Image (tube, rainbow, N blue to C red):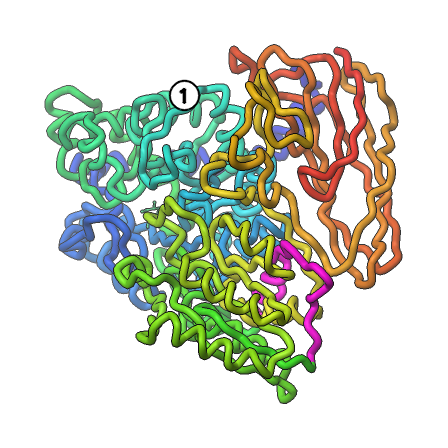
Amino acid sequence: MKRSFLTTLLLLFALGPLFAQTSQYRSEADSILALMTLEEKIGQLNLPAAGDFTTGQAASSNIAEKIKAGKVGGLFNIKTAEKIRDVQRVAVEESRLGIPMLFGMDVIHGYETMFPIPLGLSCSWDMDLIERTARIAAKEASADGICWTFSPMVDISRDPRWGRVSEGSGEDPYLGSQIARAMVTGYQGDDLTQPNTIFSCVKHFALYGASEAGRDYNTVDMGRIKMYNDFFPPYKAAVDAGVASVMTSFNEVDGIPASANRWLMTEVLREQWGFDGFVVTDYTAINEMIDHGLGDLKLVSAKALQAGVDMDMVGEGFLTTLEESLQAGDISEEQIDDACRRILIAKYELGLFDNPYRYCRVEEADKIVFSAEHRQEAREIATETLVLLKNEGNVLPLQKNAKIALVGPLAKNRENMPGTWSVAARFPESVSLFDGLTNVLGDNADITYARGANFVEDSLLEARFSIFGKPTYRDTRSAEEMIEEALEISQNADVLVAAVGEAAEMSGESSSRSDINLPESQQKLLKALVETGKPVVMVLFTGRPLSITWADQNIPAILNVWFAGSEAGNAIAEVLFGEVNPSGKLTATFPQNVGQIPIYYNHKKTGRPLAEGQWFQKFRSNYLDVTNEPLYPFGYGLSYTSFDYGELQLSKTQLQGNETLQASIDITNSGEYDGQEVVQLYIRDLVGSITRPVKELKGFQKIRLAQGETQTVTFEITPEDLRFYDYDLDYVWEPGEFEIMIGGNSRDVVSKTVDWQK
Ligand code: BGC
C-alpha cells in the first residue's frame, strides 16, 4: 500500500507522542534492568495468587517473604484497596529495588456491580452497552486497587457442553470481534495513564473453546484454515484494539500446548499481528505441560519462555528453574530480559512507578463501588440481554394485577443471580426474581411462592456446583412433597411463573455437562405445572444453550434470562411486566438435543446436503432420529411486538473492484408495542477456492421502532466484507457470486445474489 507524503506526515504527527512515550518507557525500563540481579529479573515474571480466590490446584505461599526478596512481579485476586496498599508497601519499601507490583483480578462481567454473564451481554448486540459495562467495571476495580483484569474472554465455542461458553460471546467470529474491541476499549479507555482505566488481558489464546467433547481443559485439534477464519478473529480484534496483555490457554494447539507454542505466541501474535504487550500464562499452565507430556518443570518452563511467555501464573516454574536453564545454556539472558522489560514497561504505562498506590483510592471506592447509579445501569443493561424464546398466545407481558404463583429453585435465590466468575460480587445483596417482582409491583403484589423442586435430584451432583458463595439451599423434602406444594399454590393463581434452569456454577470453569437437558427434578415440576392447564411462563436461568425441546413444545412462554447480574430480579420483572420489551437475540445456537453438537449457523455445506425442508433423505447428511435444524438458531429472539421485513433492495447486482454495495430493507413495527430489533446481514460466497460457510454474519444494526413505524436499514458492503483466509492463509477475496441476506435471525432471511468481479 502506498501512502502519500502528507498522510505519512500526519500519521507521524498523530502517533509521535505515543512513540515517544513508548520509547521513554523502554529506556526507563532498561535503566532499571541494568540494576537488577538475575534473580530479581526472574522475580518480575512471577505472578502468584493471593489466595482470596483460587481456581487451580495450588495456592501460593510465603508471598510476603517472596515480595521482599524481589521474587514477585504481581499478585491477583486480592480484594480491597486497603489490603492492596499494604501489600504494595511491602514491595515498594521492603524489596531492594522497590519495584511496584501489578494487581490483577478476574473482573469478568463487573466488579461488585455485576452485569449479566458475558454470553448474556453478547445477546444485547449493543457495543456501546457492552463497552459501558467494562468501563464501569474498570472504574470500580481501579478505585479498589486493581489495575489489570483477566478479561475479555473471547474464545469462540460451538459446544454448549463446555461450561465456559457462559464467559464468552457465543459462536460467531464477527460478533465476537466487535465485542472483544468494545470490552478492551471499555477497560482501557483511550488513555491508560488515567487512574480509572485498567489493563485488559484477552484470553485464552488460543482455541480454548474448541476442547474435544466439550470437556474442560481437553485436547483441541483444528486445522489452520479454521483457526484463522473462525477462531482467531476475536483475539486479533483485541490486539488491534490495543489490548495490553494476552493470556495463554490450557489446551494444545497443533500438538503443542499454547504456553509452549512459539508459532502461536511469537509468530502469530507478535510477528503477524504486531502485539507488543506482555503474555501471561493461565493458572499453572506451565506446570500442566508436565502432564501434557512435554517434559519436567525445568524443560517446560524453558519452552514457555522461548515460546514468548513473559509471566508465569501461580506455578513458579520460571521462578524455580530459569536460572538453572540459563546456566545450562538452554535459554538466554536476553530472553529473560525481554520478558522482564515487558513487565516493567507495563508498570510504567500504568503509572505505578510514579505512584504505586494510584489505584488504591479508598474514598472513591467507597463512593462508586456498587453505587446506586451503577446498579441502575446494571438493571437497565440487564433488560437488554434477555431473550424471549417463545410467547404463544401472548402470555407475556404479564398483567400487573395477575395473581402469580412463583415456583422453582431460582425464584428466591439471590446468590446465584450474578452467575459464574463473579469473584467480587455482593451475593446476598443481589436481587432475586421474587424480590424483583415485588419491587416492580409494590403494594399490589399478589405473589405466592413455593420451591417446587431442587436443582437436581442427586445431592452429590448438587454439591459439585454449590460453591464459591453461591448456595443452592437444597430442600430436604421429597420431590413429590415439593411439587404438591407448588400445585397447591397454583390453584388460586392466574399464571404460573417457573424460575428454572441451572445454578450459577453449573456452567463456568470446570463445569462441563454431558447432558444439557433441564435436570429431571425441574422437568417433573414443569410437567406438573403444565398439567394444571394454567398458563405457564418459564423463566430460564442458564449459562449455556440448553436443549429444552419438551419445554418448547409444551410451555407457551419462555424467557431466557441467563444470569443477569446484581439487578437480575428487577430487570427480569420489568421485562415480564412489559415495562421493557425484550430485544435480546441468541449468539449461540440452541440444539434440539445434545447429539446435534457441534451445531452452529455458519457451517459448511457438505457434498451431500439435505434438501431444504426435508428431515431425512437416504445417503444425505442428516440423522435418522432428529432433523438437522436447531431448536433456536443463532440470532433468534422474539419481541412483544412484531417486525415485518420488506423486500431486499440492492444498489447494484454487478460490481467491480472496490465498489460499495448498498443493501437496504424496510422494517415495520407491525405489533402493539414499541420495540427494538437487531437487523442482521449475512453473506455467502457461492464459489470459492476452498469451501465456504453457508452464511456468515457481516453486519448488524439494532434499531428502535415505535408502534407502526417503518425504518429503512442500509448496510454498506465492500470487498473487505468478502475476505477470508485461503488455503495459503492469505487474506483474500475472490470474484464471483455472493448471496446477500438480511433478517431478524440467521434462519429467516430474505436474499438476493450479486456478481462481484475484481
Ligand atoms: C482461568 C482463567 C482465570 C485464571 C485466574 C484460570 O483457572 O482459566 O480464566 O483468569 O484462572 O483466576
**Residue 380 magenta:** yes
Q: Is residue 529 above or below residue 450?
A: above
- Residue sitting farthest toward the bottom: 443
Q: Which residue is mark 1?
A: 267
**Residue 563 horizontal/vertical position (percent):** 49, 60
- Label count reads 1
Q: Nearer the viewer, residue 505 or 40?
A: 505
Tell me, yes or no, whether the highlighted magenta stretch contains residue 704. no
- Image coordinates for residue 28, horizontal then vertical, percent: 36, 38
- Where residue 30 sits: x, y (%)? 32, 34
The kind of secondary structure element at disc 1 is helix
**Residue that appears at 45% across and 55% down:** 518
Please tell me which residue is depicted at 32% across the width and 31% down the height of the picture: 219
User: Where's the N terminus, which quadrant?
Assistant: top right
How dense is the environment of label 1, judged by Cα within 10 Å: few (below 14), some, or many (20 and up)? some
Kindly indicate the quadrant of the structure image that contains residue 4.
top right
Q: Quadrant of the C terminus?
A: top right
- In the image, taking residue 56 as reference, residue 422 lies left or right, namely right
The residue segment tinted magenta is 373-400
The answer to whether residue 31 is visible is: no
